[in-house]
Amino acid sequence: MLAYIIRRLLYAIPILIGVNLLTFTLFFVVNTPDDMARMQLGIKRVTPEAIQKWKAERGYDKPLLYNGTAEGAGKITRTIFFEKSVKLFVFDFGRADDGRDIGHEIRMRMAPSLAIAVPAFILGLFVTISFALLLAFFRATYLDFWGVVMCVAMMSISSLFYIIGGQYLVSKVWHLVPISGYAGGLDAGRFLLLPVIISVVAGIGSSTRWYRTIFLEEIGKDYVRTARAKGLSELAVLFRHVLKNAMIPILTGVVVVIPLLFMGSLLTESFFGIPGLGSYTIDAINAQDFAVVRSMVFIGSVLYIAGLLLTDLSYTLVDPRVRLQ
């Protein structure tokens, strides 16, 4: 297994280089360093000297990918791509265009993002799997039918509706929790309660239908008929056999999501004014801050690769027949 893990980690290096290069290329196709300088300095009445000074202070005065005026390895190393992107592989994120330390901002904003994402993930997983098991238990009944109808209806509604509707009813009409904002310590609970509930509700429709499909597929297999023939109750079959054997497809969708929890929820954090990684990314995109966007994309890629590796490793825990080679 150690050889498998090392091989997967080595595979990740060219993937990360490719993602980094693609992000870099796409960003600079849209914005040149001159455009970035005008964005930060103000479009009106900005002088060429001010633009050159801004670019020199932040290292954007060099060629993008190839420096024809440099000697030897400097043709590659004295470029914006090498100086801005290669350091990401040692998690040196550098500074944003406004001068703030990106690594410090990420560490500060990680806690608010996790404060929303972790309870929403755990509670959502419990609610959707329980609901899907209930529908599978009462399959082909009116409860199953109306449960599926409700799931389809919930899937058809945009998450923006849940956010805006929840803010209007719970915060503006009923005055139960603040409409937006964030506070540290125990006061954070008042600000996080509504975003967590809305995150759970918004995911019930699609997740429940997916888990229900997995459970119904398992229920139709031979080992379930054998378990019933041995006299086990339907509840025992469902929880002791179906749920256990459905763990691999469930893990495929669940474990890979766990690392992405660090990235936060873009819409939820933005609408509720939570100073997490999601709102940090949105603000950076609006400001066209390439340094921050590049760092967040890189972190997302690393976490996603780690999630895929964790998913493969978790297969061996739930099914001893699985061998990683």
Image (cartoon, grey):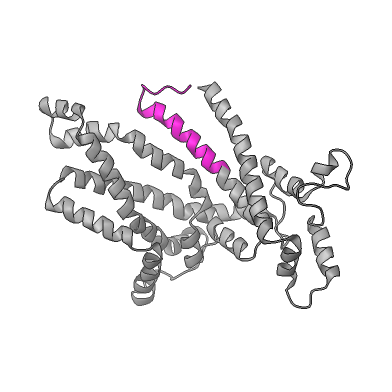
Residue interval drawn in magenta: 302-325
The question of residue 295 being in magenta is answered with: no
204 or 193, which lies in front? 204
Residue 143 is situated, as x and y percent measured from the top left of the image, at 15, 52
**Vertical arrangement, residue 303 with respect to residue 110, above or below:** above
Residue drawn at x 33%, y 58% is 201
**Vertical arrangement, residue 33 with respect to residue 77, above or below:** below
The answer to whether residue 193 is seen in the rendering is: yes
Residue 291 is situated, as x and y percent measured from the top left of the image, at 68, 55
Report which quarter residue 77 is drawn in.
top right
The answer to whether 262 appears left or right of 54 in the picture is left
The answer to whether 319 appears left or right of 113 in the picture is left
- Number of on-image labels: 0
Residue 34 is situated, as x and y percent measured from the top left of the image, at 76, 64
Residue drawn at x 43%, y 40% is 255
Report which quarter residue 287 is drawn in.
bottom right
Is most of the magenta stretch helix, strand or loop?
helix
The answer to whether 209 appears left or right of 183 in the picture is left
The answer to whether 303 appears left or right of 70 in the picture is left
The question of residue 316 being in magenta is answered with: yes
The answer to whether residue 104 is seen in the rendering is: no
Residue 146 is situated, as x and y percent measured from the top left of the image, at 18, 56
